[in-house]
Each structure stands twice: as structure tokens, then as C-alpha cells.
Image (cartoon, helix red, strand yellow):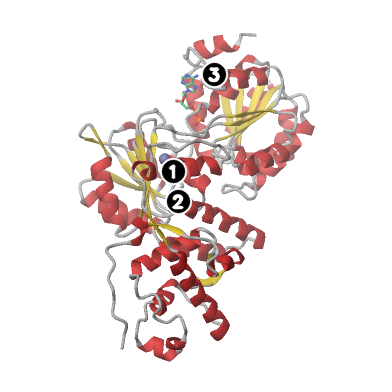
Amino acid sequence: MTDQYEVLRTVFGYDEFRGDQAEIVAQVIGGGDAVVLMPTGGGKSLCYQVPALVRDGCAVVVSPLIALMADQVGALRQLGVRAAYLNSTQAPEDRADVERRFLAGELDLIYVAPERLSGQYTRDLLSRGQLSLVAIDEAHCVSQWGHDFRPDYLALGELAELWPDVPRIALTATATRRTHEEITERLHLQRARHFVSSFDRPNITYRIEPKKQANKQLLDFVRTEGVVDGEPATGIVYALSRKSVESIAAFLSSNGINALPYHAGLDKRLREDTLHRFLREDGIVVVATIAFGMGIDKPDVRFVAHVDLPKSVEGYYQETGRAGRDGLPSVAWMAYGLADVVQQQRLIQMSDGDAAHRRSQSEHLNAMLALCETASCRRQRLLRYFDQESGPCGNCDTCLNPPSTWDGTVPAQKLMATIWRLDREYRQHYGAGHLIDILRGVDNKRMDQLGHKNLSTYGIGDDLDANTWSSVVRQLLASGYLETRGEYGQYYLTEAGVPVMHGKVPQLFREDARGPARTRRPKAA
Ligand code: ADP
Ligand code: ZN
């Protein structure tokens, strides 16, 4: 049996372990279980690959990233490691060959898709060979309330009883305290040692700005900050829909940026070609849906831009984490607006899940919004979400340019009173546009027809312009004092919002979210 340092040097060509790697590796080699929380780029793979080569037998690696298995196995084979995979994309004769080599003791690592391991056939097969360890990658997929739930992960807990003498290691790059607890419990890792690295990515600068003209803002950003030493830098732009991916890529290209679209609806050959160019060439900007990037190891991505609001802080952290794996300065930039929020709330309400699932999705969205609307350090907010405390970072937009705030307590009351009265007096709920029209005393036919000029709040908000009102709505939504429901995103007060309506909770809003200079509009006669 060779020791772990020899494996590290001779097989992987590294001199030293990084961070917690040495301790994690020792724990697993010693036969103990481990739960590993380590940010992207931290070096999770070595934590099970090294023990796999030190311990006798073959390691089982569970990974949901089926599309990447061939690459991962190929990379290991290049290092002379005896690795193979079992998944649904494989031809039957290839699978039979892998099974034969496993049983003959000719493999050090076998990558297996989670759905294979919930089946009896694969379990029986693996039970007939000698196993060195079980590694469960992307372990947060076991969390039902997380952003990446995979039902097949739930069955993985049974492996503890199936192979009681085989050490197990679960790894993830994103886990709140709750997800961490779920991993431990559902994967039956009660006896594991826990290794929690800092989630901070100090070389990433976070910037989030209100969306005005998304395309133009993005282009400005790419032109000014997507440049390193005068050369265009490699970057990823995330958008939610395939349609916007294509239109943004076309827009950037027509403005001289080397941009390529990437989404699941594009031809497979084209996607492979895009991925290949992204990995090999310099200065490529891939515009993608979230399908792009999981497991891709491109160290010098200089920026990640979001033109739509991610669905959760976990998703945002994971996607922005693809920037700057090499440790050099990188930027995570985002533009978001009220329309994004309303659209996502609508999608949540229309989704198939049960009420608890929808509530959890709303909580995820609200946490994301709160990060957008915060007037304090973004990194601090982000790390706090993962239960890690830190001071203000000095490397995010709010630290570098502290936003001035304004007292929005009274406007918040006016808005909420309007919603409350519409509910009380008319049993009606409206979208932001109409609420703002009421507050600003807009005089039009619709107002007459609906009789809303009779509301006591009609026109009481004409001291603020529509943009400012829109930011008030957004920030109250972000704080969970308002929620939207229904097809058109109609506004409702939440229970938490009641004291705000009564003026008992001071509201400090970001000044920069207010939009351009205030215009006083004369109240209609
Ligand atoms: P993760 O899975 O945590 O995102 P990886 O396992 O892909 O991270 O590792 C990220 C990068 O760091 C890889 O290029 C890997 O080869 C490199 N790496 C990992 N451990 C070490 C080490 N001890 N010394 C030098 N490089 C390392
Ligand atoms: Zn900061």
C-alpha cells in the first residue's frame, strides 16, 4: 500500500495537499466517514481520488453529472488511473466490459449515476467486488428543499446498511446549515467527521445593479470590465430562457464581442463545439442557460454576468463561483428588475409541486432578492446565508460605493394602505403598475371605470416618480412584506407586512434603486 503523499506526487503531480484535503484524505483512508463542504475550485475530487488509490479495492463515485463522466474518467485514465463509469448513455457491451473489469479487481474508481445505485442490479454487482469507499458528489442534491433535488439521491442512505464497513464521503460546494443537516441525516452520515471550508471567494468582486436596459448595460459591462490587459476576457452570461440566450448572443456578436449561445435546445454537435472553443480559446463569451458550466473546469473565467435573477442564492453562488478558479481578480455582475421577480413568482405559483414546495421556492427567491436589495456588504450577506460570519469585504459594490439610503417608512405605508383598501373595499388585487398609478393620482379611463379615484390613497404618492415607487415595491417584496399571486402578479400584504403598514418598522431603501431625478407631476385636476 502506497501512502497518500506518494499518490499525490506520482499520480497527480502535486507537492502538497490544500486546505482540508490532507485531513479529509486521512479520515477516509482510516476507514471513517466524511462530510465535505468546500467551495468550487477548492479541490474536492482529490479528497476521494487519493484514498481510492491508497485503499484496497475499487471506489464507487456517485455523480449526477452524467454528461461529464466520460471526461472525468478520461482525465483520470490519462494519469494512468484505472477508472470507468456506468450510466445510461453507454452501449450494453461497454457496460458488460466495465462490469467484468470491476469484478476482476481491475478498477480503482467506478463512476456511477445515482439512478443506477437505486436499482438492485447494480447494488448486487458492486456487492460482489471489493469496495474501497463510496464518494457521493454534489451531495446537496439529496435536499428536497434545495435547488437541485434529485429523487435518486434519497436511496443512497441505504448504502450505509448495505456496506457497513465501507467508508463514505459526501461532498458539495453549496450548503446552508439546513442542507448540511439533511445531507448528514439522509445519507446516514451520523458518525462522519465534518469538514467545512470557508465559502468565501475573495478574488470575486460582486456587483448587482437595477435593470434598466439590460442589453446596453451588459454590453457596457463586457466592454469595460470584460477586458484584461487590453484583451477580451473569457466570460459566461447567464439568462433564464433559450430565446433570450439567443438574442443576447446575437446582440453581443453584432457589437464585436466573441459571443456564442449555449442551451439544451441547440444541436448537440454545436454545443460540443461551443464548449470546446470556450475551453481552448481565449476571450470567448458564452451566453447560456444554467445548463452550462456544472463541473466545467476552466480556471480563467474572468466574469460571470446574470441578466436574469437566479432562482436562489445557492444557484447564484454556484454560477458566480465559476469565475476566477485560478484565484485572480474576477467579477460577478448582475442586473435585475421588478419584472424578473414577478415572473419568477408566477412560475412558482404555476409549478406542479405541493404548497410546501412552492413556499420553499418562494423563500429561496426572497433570499436572493434580499441579497440584491441589501445596502450592506454583499459578501457578508452571501456568507451569512451559508451560516458563515465575516466582516465587510471591501471588494463588492456596496463596500466600494456605499449606497446612500433614504427613509421610505411613509411611502411604504402609503403603498401598503392602498393594497389593503383595495382588498377591503373592492376585494381586488392589482399588479405594481396600477398600484403606482393610484398612488400618483393618474387620471385615465381605467381609473374612472374602476372607481379607484374614490380611494383615500388616490394621489397621495405624487411626490415620488414611478421609478422610485417601483423600487419601493421591489424592496418591500424583497423583505417579504408583500407577495404576489395569480397570473398577473397581483400584490398582497403578508403577515409580516402588517406592522410595516402601521409605520412600526422603519424602512431604509437604497437610493440608487430609485431611478433618475424626481419629477413632480401635477395632480390631475
Ligand atoms: P472542485 O471539485 O472542488 O470544484 P477540483 O477537484 O476540480 O475542485 O479542483 C480544482 C482545481 O484545483 C483542479 O484543477 C485541481 O487539479 C486543482 N487542485 C486540487 N487539489 C490540488 C492540490 N493539492 N494542489 C494543486 N492543485 C490542486
Ligand atoms: Zn463587501
Q: Are marks 1 and 2 in contact (CB under 8 Å)?
A: yes
Look at the numbered disc 1 and say if its residue's Cβ is closer than 8 Å to ligand 2. Answer: yes
| Residue 399 against residue 348 in the figure, above or below | above
Amino acid type at circle 1 is Cys
Residue, x 70% and y 44% (percent of image)?
154
User: Which quarter of the figure is the C terminus placed in?
Assistant: bottom left
Q: Badge 3, how many Cα within 10 Å: few under 14, some, many 20+? A: some
Q: In front: mark 3 or mark 2?
A: 2
* Amino acid type of the residue tagged 2 in the rendering: Thr
Q: Amino acid at mark 3?
A: Val
Q: Residues within 10 Å of mark 2 (few under 14, many from 20)?
A: some
The span from disc 3 to disc 2 (Cα, nearest Å) is: 48 Å
Residue 397 seen in this snapshot: yes
What residue did someone put label 1 on? Answer: 377
Label 1 crowd bin: few (<14), some (14–19), many (20+), radius 10 Å:
many
**What residue does disc 3 label?**
81
Circle 3 — which element? loop
In three-dimensional space, the C-alpha distance between marks 1 and 2, rounded to whole angstroms, equals 8 Å
Query: Which comes sooner in the sequence, label 3 or label 2?
Result: 3
Disc 3 and disc 1: Cα gap in Å? 45 Å
